[in-house]
Image (cartoon, rainbow, N blue to C red):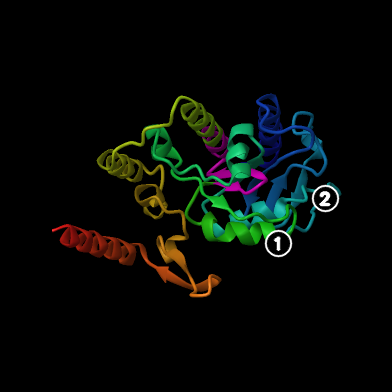
Amino acid sequence: MDERSARKLIVEIGKLLYERSYVVSSDGNVSIRLDENTVLATPTMTCKGRMTEDCLALTDMDGKPKTDKRASSELAMHLLIYKMRPDIKAVCHAHPPHGTAFAVAGLAIDKPILSEVILTLGCVPLTEYGTPSTDELTEAMKPYVAHHNALLMANHGAVAYGDDLWQAFDRLETLEHTAKIAILAKALGGANDLPQDAIEKLINIREKAGYLRANARCQACGYLHDANIACDLDVEYPSANGGNGQKISFTREELIELLTQAASLGGANQN
């Protein structure tokens, strides 16, 4: 996308974010990667609903300004995503109320309750809290960026990214819509998860259609860890004196084997 079109689109998306109450005041930030070393981003301390094309900031991939306009203080979040995901060309960060409610409550959006969400978005994991505009935030995001297209950041907000800015916005909107439905379903007594065989069919469809890659299969197993440690689980055993004991890690396969053995022993004892 050329710079002129990108400026126009960022202003348009900024107004949508503001009108839909995904951001207020100077919250949130949006960017487009124009080429290998140029990023166009929203400026610092500016309402996304009142931006103009000439107020946007240009930087290189290290965050160094290319004009006199100052980019958002959270630009590092965008640059991390671009560096870890060469396929990504746009990033959209906001504080949508229902999605952010999940983040504040310490919850991921990871329940398979909507087929459309499994097809187009997949799991949205919750990262650990990191102070905005610091390395803490980007460090907390690193284990998840490569394997997910949207993240919730604890006590902060949400970020979504895609091949272009419309896709990034659509993913953020899907995240917010899903969170809203989940909250309403909870008020009605709870949501029913889709059956496992239906989830597997949806995952096969989305991979054949190119919506998501195979490394986004966390929704199928229910865990939200980095794919390189594929669903490992840390278990901390209490020590004999009541204090915290040693932390032991299990892979998903090891955990299943242990649970299977325990179930077999339980059945044998009943006999």
Q: How far apart are marks 1 and 2 (CA)?
A: 24 Å
User: Looking at the picture, which amino acid does disc 2 mark?
Assistant: Thr
Percent position (x, y) of residue 6?
Answer: 67, 38
User: Looking at the picture, which amino acid does disc 1 mark?
Assistant: Asp
Q: Which mark is residue 135?
A: 1
* Residue 36 visible within the image: no
| Residue 229 or residue 248, whichever sits in front | 248
Quadrant occupied by the C terminus: bottom left
Percent position (x, y) of residue 239?
Answer: 49, 74
At 72% from the left and 45% from the top, the residue drawn is 41
| Residue 25 or residue 162, whichever sits in front | 25
Q: Vertical placement of 87 versus 42: above or below? A: below
Residue 115 is covered by the magenta coloring: no
Percent position (x, y) of residue 246?
Answer: 49, 75
Residue located farthest toward the left when viewing the structure as drawn: 271
Left or right of residue 193: residue 244: right
Q: Vertical placement of 213 versus 247: above or below? A: above
Left or right of residue 263: residue 41: right
Identify the residue position indicated by label 2 in the image: 67
Residue density around tag 2, few if under 14, some if 14–19, many if 20 or more, within 10 Å:
few
Left or right of residue 219: residue 138: right
Residue 160 is covered by the magenta coloring: yes
Q: Earlier in the sequence, mark 1 or mark 2?
A: 2
What secondary structure is found at the residue carrying circle 2?
loop
Q: Quadrant of residue 12?
A: top right
Residue located farthest toward the right when viewing the structure as drawn: 68
Please provide the residue range marked out in magenta. Answer: 151-174
* Residue 255 visible within the image: yes
Q: Nearer the viewer, mark 1 or mark 2?
A: 1
